Amino acid sequence: MKDIVAKCQIVGRGISSALRWMEEFASEEKQRASLAKLKKLNREIKKLERATHLKPAVALFGPSQAGKSFMVGLLAKSSSDEVMYVADDATGKMYDFTDQINPPGGKESTGLVTRFTVERHAGQPADKPIMVKLFSQVDLVKIIAVGFHKNIIEPATCPREQLLGEVEKVLADLRGEMRETPYPEIDEDQIMGIKEYLSMKLGDKYIIRTLDEMSFWERAAEILPYVSWDKRYELLQFIWGKHDFFNDLFILLSRGLSTLNFANMAYVGFDALVPREVSIIDVSRYSEIKESEEEWCRKNARTGVRTKSLEVSAGGKLANIDRTILSALISELVLTLPTNVLEDHSRDFLKNADILDFPGERSADMFKERDFVVKGFEDQLKVFLRGRVSYLFDYYSLNFGISSLCLVLGDGNHEVAQLPHLILEWIHGIHGESPEARARKESDTKMLTGQDYANPLFVILSKFNTAFDKGNAMKKEGYYSIWNGRFDDNFSQAYTKQMTDVWTKKWTDKDSFKNVFILRNPMFSKAYFKNRGGETHVWEEGLKEEFEVMMSYMRESFVTDENVRSLVDKPEACWDDMIQPNHSGIDYMMPYLTPVTDPRIKKKQIEDAVEQVRKIVLNELEQYYVGGNIEVELSKAKKNALQTNLLIGKMISEQRTGKFITALSCPDYVARRVYQEFVNGQFAVQKEVSQVNVSDNQVLVDLLDSYGIQVVPGKTRYEEIISQLKTVTDIDDEKMLLEVIGEAGIDEADLHALAFYDRTKENDPVYQFVNRLVGEWLRHIDSMDSSRLKEEFCIVNPVAFVQVVGVLKDNYERVGLKERLVDALRSQVESYDVSRNQNFELVTRIASSVINQFVFSLGWIWVPVSERPVQKSSGTPIFTPGEEGMDIAQSWRTGLVESFVANVYFKSKVDNKSNLKSMSKLGEIIHSIQED
């Protein structure tokens, strides 16, 4: 992975240089959009560099109580061992995971991921061999937000203006709490990461959408790193409706993180897991958070444990922490497998990959908010738990933490509504969004590894013992209904219902999804097999004679069934492995699993993602670069135009163009927010100062007149006033002159205010407002995430979208959008008065209207008709006024394509002598990123 790390660092350094270049040379409005975008790309490249340090992992995921623990026990042990052991290398002791560590009674865990690995980590204390990874404060925000918004229905909605006012007050209060240097546990990137995650997962929720519209996160990023951990909730509480339960829980868990000095990992001993009745992975720990030390110890006296706290090693220091708090803070528990597992060649995949056991997914609890607030503590905690489980799968999926996914499904109807969508998102993210893309991916993977199997998704139909019970209760003619129920109704149909990508039927362009496996537990097959053993382990000796004929008919039915044959690669081998004494079906699966854990596959995934980021960065920077060779620039422009033409053509055929153009427009709320911030900020100060100066002008004019100096307010230049003063006082040194007249009561600032106001773009408040407005509009466009681009507009390659936005940026300069905005808005902006003319709605409508005229025509309506591109189908210029039957979508497509070349010619005519230094620097940055 060293070569990928090097690429990440090259791109990262390039982005850092580009950020400095933007701040020095880019216009204010372009800075706003590009800085935000480059910072986001910088976060992405850092994430990819972190991913290079992660081992490939096989994840077990699915509904709660589906049989994942049983499957872990099969994968993580040698086939010669009866049970799965976890090793304590310090003492040499082995723990039976099922009987000594896993919570009893089929309980779900506390919502953490358990990692099983053969890798030994250096550096952990001998008496604390178990590594636990911890949530951060940022993680807690995401968890509570997802839990609240996914499980609380009919939430109270605070009116927008009231919410804005409350947020402004908290922001003002927290500014007073800021220290000069930031705290180390949280930074701007992490806070903006919250924004990106919540926009992706909860962007349709009123609170999340409204906070985003008021630049909540950008302002939070300026403040929260500088205030202490126990104050941050005051601003963050708006995300979860300011509920006391979540506020208290956030503070309680944050205090636990503070105890561990906000470490991202810690080490514990086996006393954290054994006895399992007080284990940190038992869901019961949640309900004990409020219990006192005395109460908890009395309740658990029979276990022999005498204290609620645990000693933990974090950051090289020992600390004592309440085990119930620690339980809630753990994201991942790392358990070490004995080395003898590697002696079994059927478990060779463990040499390259770890096993991740995810907590089971459950349906959302769906409390009405008015009911939630009166629920008991344990019921309210369920919302937090649901949030944890959802967030964990998202986190590992988004951070390349899952290389292969085993979806474990028990017998029964599909009940967890969100599961099919989570699985589809994972498929699209790691393996391709279409049958054609998946076919290419598998072909490339097979070529890379030299193996025959390349499908990273495994569907495991567990608890297959139930099929025997159903078969025993019916005639052989009815066996097909068993397979129809398990394979089609409960899986294929349930996981593709109402989805455009019917991946179970069309996995590649040539075949269906053929990676379904079956699993049975011999412990629950006693009725059909001769066996010996007790309550916890059995040894099968063969089928009972009275069931041999039934099993023969079931096999024949299974291997010939249409549903089975479309979803199982080798039905005969699959059944035969499962039905063997002391077999479960796992051995049939292993030859399919081992090849897809090849580290080269993960490396290629990260490498492709790095290359994608690099291309986006280059496209962003090339929008600003003007080279000396116009022919080269034209060649690039024509290539980009061709790609964009195909993209818009596809949108038109799918009737998505109108929605796409609308997405590029400026919403009223953006214009209104910018104007409100503007009049409440610098412009308000300027207005106040100008009003004071007007009242004081005559006094100063009279004073100067007494010295024989004639001044007309607003018309006499400052330099002329100084010249007259030098003549009258006979002082040529301006600094000395200002000191002398200052003693006489004439201040330099008053002279500037009295003199002629030479309005430039730099000091014109209307231009300042327009710069902010255009910058925020561009930032709004750039904030569209890749999932929305794919789902709504079929833009699979984000680079194509960058090119479209680049055209908008060049076009608005070419047609003078900012100047048109200034002309349209000047009279209204300058007439704003806090008491008599709060013209928010009018300015908002004018600003949005002008920008959206530009977007819907790409500015071509402001170009003489004779100079516009011609529509091929009609032979008339695009956007011709009054043209009968004008095709707006095709006009927009033509205008976009022709803009690429038009903008090259426009840039070549601009005097770039003053930009020679900036272009030279930008060229060096681009070249550094292009180099491999």
Image: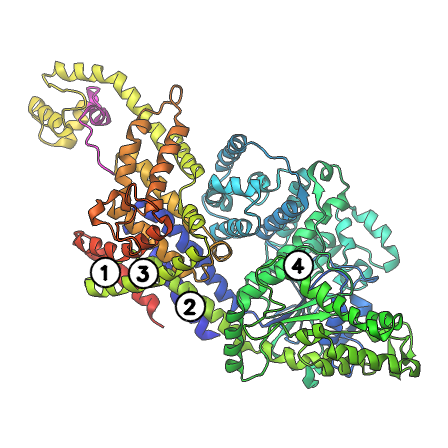
Q: Earlier in the sequence, mark 1 or mark 2?
A: 2
**Cα distance, mark 1 to mark 3?**
26 Å
Give SS at disc 3.
helix
Give SS at disc 4.
helix
Q: Amino acid at mark 3?
A: Ala
Residue under label 2, please give it: 611
Q: Is residue 184 magenta?
A: no
- Tell me the tag on residue 641: 3
Which of the two marks, 1 or 3, is nearer to us in this view? 3
Q: Earlier in the sequence, mark 1 or mark 3?
A: 3
Number of marks in the image? 4
Q: Quadrant of the C terminus?
A: bottom left
Q: Amino acid at mark 2?
A: Glu
**Cα distance, mark 2 to mark 4?**
31 Å
Residue under label 4, please give it: 419
> Tag 4: Cα neighbours inside 10 Å, few (<14), some, or many (≥20)?
many
* Residue ranking furthest to the front: 884
How far from the left and from the top, in percent, is residue 440? 50, 74
Which residue range is magenta in the image?
A: 742-761
Is 196 on the left-hand or right-hand side of 230? left
Q: Which of 912 and 100 lies nearest the eye of the viewer?
A: 912
Which of the two marks, 2 or 4, is nearer to us in this view? 4
Q: Amino acid at mark 4?
A: Leu
